[in-house]
Image (cartoon, rainbow, N blue to C red):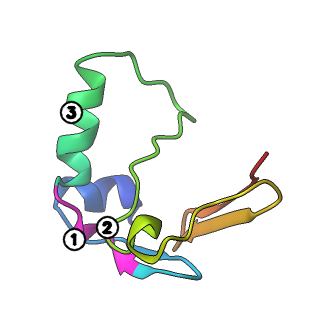
Amino acid sequence: MESHANSLERGREIPLHLRKQDSNTGKMIFTLAEQIAQLSNRITLYPGDVILTGTPAGVGAGRSEFLKPGDVVKLWIEKIGSLTNTMV
């Protein structure tokens, strides 16, 4: 079975599913590999580290819509898992 780490090396797009956004990593300005390379040049990355990259499209400023206390943000990446955070 192939891991997503291996697919990143080949540049395959990983679908990102968000309630207000539905996009994929291929629409980001910088590839995930480029982002990880830049970050790892500055800090040591460890297994389990979470890298927050932002989203490929659909920022709230264009809709005057911003996160507020109590909002729940849940994202998931196919075959990897999900992450849920409640804003404070």
Res 56 label:
2
Start and end of the magenta stretch?
23-29
Task: Name the residue type under label 3.
Answer: Ala
| Residue at 55% over, 63% down | 80
Q: Along the polypeptide, which appears first: circle 3 or circle 1?
A: 1
Location of residue 9 in the rendering, given as x and y in whole percent from the top left corner: 20, 53
Residue under the image location 40 percent in, 54 percent down: 54
- Residues under numbered marks 3 and 1 in contact, where contact means CB atoms less than 8 Å apart: no
Residue type at the position of mark 1: Gly
Q: Position of residue 58 (x, y in %)?
A: 38, 74
Q: How far is disc 3 from disc 1 in space, using C-alphas?
A: 17 Å
Quadrant of res 72 = bottom right
Mark number, residue 26: 1
Query: Marks 2 and 3, Cα distance to the nearest angstrom?
Result: 18 Å
Above or below 84: residue 24: below
Q: Quadrant of the C terminus?
A: top right
Q: Which mark is residue 37?
A: 3
State the image coordinates of residue 33 (x, y, percent, origin top left): 21, 46
Q: At numbered mark 2, what does the secondary structure look like: helix, strand or loop? A: loop
Q: Secondary structure at mark 1?
A: helix
Magenta stretch: includes residue 70: no
Q: Is residue 28 magenta?
A: yes
